[in-house]
Amino acid sequence: GAVVSQHPSWVICKSGTSVKIECRSLDFQATTMFWYRQFPKQSLMLMATSNEGSKATYEQGVEKDKFLINHASLTLSTLTVTSAHPEDSSFYICRGGGISNTEAFFGQGTRLTVV
Amino acid sequence: QKEVEQDPGPLSVPEGAIVSLNCTYSNSAFQYFMWYRQYSRKGPELLMYTYSSGNKEDGRFTAQVDKSSKYISLFIRDSQPSDSATYLCAMSFGSSNTGKLIFGQGTTLQVKP
């Protein structure tokens, strides 16, 4: 199946700094990218949905100024966690889909630890 | 009440056992039902999907949907240690998995050799 490559797989950062997570669709054009957060032993919570070339749509309760999403090309979407705090420590996963796809594909996930 | 309820387990079974994983949901508008498998620290991978009530079989896996009871199941026959993972049910209002999905909490399964 199609591949969504997510980097980094894990990152540790200091409180107050920003972290960028990238998701690339390697063999298809991802017109839509979903970003999720997953806490230990909990389900995937949708944070936002982005469509290439448009502003992301954020779910209720998700701070758009803190979680910046960019989807400027059909093969790359990024999530930047700004001014990270320990409570932002979580597993972040993207899921990308394209017009010609019958399935949307998950990235490998990024384990963020803020110290 | 959560839209999708799933017993988080953990569920521990001996190798070769039949495993039954279940989810219930409250919104009758869900049309597309999926099961994902997630290994530790990895992204989920799609195992099976169904679009209507009934059964769908793929090798050792059988997905079952009962829309009248708002209940879906995943059965794993002849379970293997490699099946040890977290299994997430997911649902959507559309006719594919390319849109917004609502996930269950996930059930952690351990298959012991």
Image (cartoon, coloured by chain):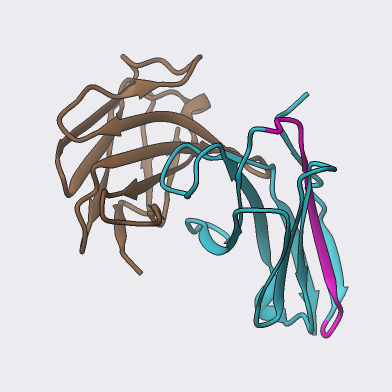
Relative to residue B58, is residue A11 drawn left or right?
Answer: left
Q: Nearer the viewer, residue A20 or B11?
A: B11
Residue B74's quadrant in the figure?
A: bottom right
- Numbered-mark total: 0
Residue B39's quadrant in the figure?
A: bottom right
Relative to residue A89, is residue A39 drawn left or right?
Answer: right
Tell me, what hue is chain B? cyan
Regarding residue A19, the answer to whether it shows in the image is no
Q: Nearer the viewer, residue A30 or A81?
A: A30
Give x and y (percent) for residue A65.
31, 14
Image position of B19 with respect to A56: above or below:
below
Give x and y (percent) for residue A75.
17, 49
Magenta-span inclusion, residue B25 = yes
Give x and y (percent) for residue B38.
58, 60
Image position of A31 with respect to B59: above or below:
above
Q: Residue at x 85, y 76 (%)?
A: B18
Q: Nearer the viewer, residue A19 or B104?
A: B104
Q: Nearer the viewer, residue A75 or B58?
A: B58
Regarding residue B113, the answer to whether it shows in the image is yes
Magenta stretch bounds: B15-28
Give x and y (percent) for residue B113.
80, 85
Image position of A26 with respect to A18: above or below:
below
Relative to residue A10, is residue A98 drawn left or right?
Answer: left
Quarter of the figure with the N terminus of chain B: top right
Tell me, what hue is chain A? brown
Magenta-span inclusion, residue B99 = no
Relative to residue A32, is residue A85 drawn left or right?
Answer: right
